Image: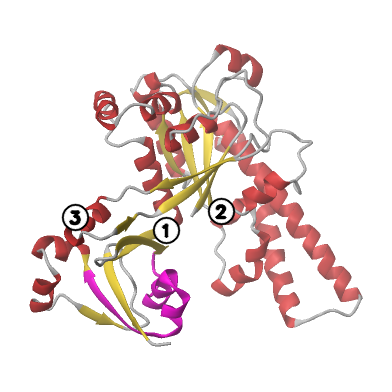
Amino acid sequence: MQIGLIGYAKSGKTTIFNALTQGEAPTDKYHSVHDQAHIAVVQVTDERVSTLSRIYQPKKTIYATIEYHDFPGIFGDPADSPESNIYAAIRNMDGYALVLRSFSDIELDTLCGDADPLRELSDIEQEMILRDLILAEKRLERIELGYKRGVKTPAVQSEERVLHNICEHLQQGSPLRSMQLSAEDAKLVKGFAFFSQKPMLILLNCSEDNLNPNSALERRSDDNGALERRPFDDLSELITELSGKRYQAEMIAGRFEEELSKLDADEAQVFLEDMGIAKSVRERLNHLCYKMMGYISFFTVGADEVRAWTIQQGDNAVTAAGRIHSDLARGFIRAECFRYVDIIAHGSEKVLREKGLFRLEGKDYIVHDGDIISIRFNV
């Protein structure tokens, strides 16, 4: 899974990236904006994998991973070329974590204006929509030109129909992630990698003080088409408002979390508990990205390896087999399955077999989060 950290310059993306990866990328507010993405692979901590490793004592234990890309500030400069390498890389992400500045800073307030996360969100969403609309309209122009040259296949006509529907949706100011496309239609336009079609998580980058309910940030309301500024009692109110707009949002004190990432685990846990935070930013964000993408984990176990695998919720046993190796999907016969909770409750596969908790499932079996699977195959 590849997740892009995006947002305006100086919103705190790189600070959060450092907190996630224990990195040392420069974050001083006077430091020039980087022009290349910072990239790091982060291990997804899963206590189930650790527990299975203790049971099976394998030679290798492999956790799932997420690849985070910290991109330069985007959508802020009208001179930015939508065809640039950075924008191409952003389009290739599986999903986005949009960082919105939700803290006050005298210098940044003077340079960039007061922190207004809702305005930033609206501006970035509209820029995404505009760029997607330009991309779709350019393709429609090329299709029309092809018609004039006698190129009019059923596949092109289907693509034209879907693109017209997409343009109509975008012209209403709505991101494509809010548009319902059939599986066939989604496949037709998958190659466009539209910005506004990607899942997006909102990260409200606040100060350490804002983790307590005493923030006085302001917000905008567009009720009846009018913009009106009102004080927030706390950032949790902003999260409630974003939830009402169908955004998944999380408060993160980036600078605080970055400092914690440099401490050892025990020291960091003490500070987290003092702040009333249950888990580190890495654990919270990894979990949120899985939820945003609709991903689940299944496991393979044995003396050689205990490993977590990531698939889409609703995927079947053949898809899970293919995730392990294409040969397993090609020669799939059956999937031997049992549940993580059952092995924990009973302690061994032998007991599970005696109790009838081992199952043989076919191709259409829908894999569940926490399933432990062994594939029978013949190639």
- Dot 1 or dot 2, earlier in sequence: 2
For label 1, the residue is: 294
Which residue sits at x=37%, y=82%? Answer: 363
Mark 1 secondary-structure assignment: loop
Farthest-out residue, right: 149
Magenta segment, which residues? 312-338
Say which element carries label 2: loop
Q: Position of residue 345 (x, y in %)?
A: 10, 61
State the image quarter where residue 305 is shown.
bottom left
Residue 64 pos. (x, y %): 38, 55
User: Residue type at mark 3?
Assistant: Arg
Foreground: disc 1 or disc 3: 3
Residue sitting at x 43%, y 40% = 249
Q: CA distance from mark 1 to mark 3?
A: 28 Å
87, above or below 359, in the image: above
Distance from label 1 to label 2 (Cα)?
12 Å
Count residues near mark 1 (Cα–Cα under 10 Å), then give few for <14, some for 14-19, many for 20+.
Answer: few
Q: In the image, 355: left or right of 334?
A: left
Q: Assign the C terminus to one quadrant of the image.
A: bottom left
On the image, the x and y values in percent for residue 316 come to: 38, 75
Say left or right for 74 vs 293.
right
Q: Which residue is mark 2?
A: 198
Q: Amino acid at mark 2?
A: Lys
User: Residue 270, position in %: x, y?
Assistant: 24, 25
Cα–Cα span, label 2 and label 3: 38 Å
Label 2 near label 1: C-beta < 8 Å?
Answer: no
Numbered badge on residue 54? 3
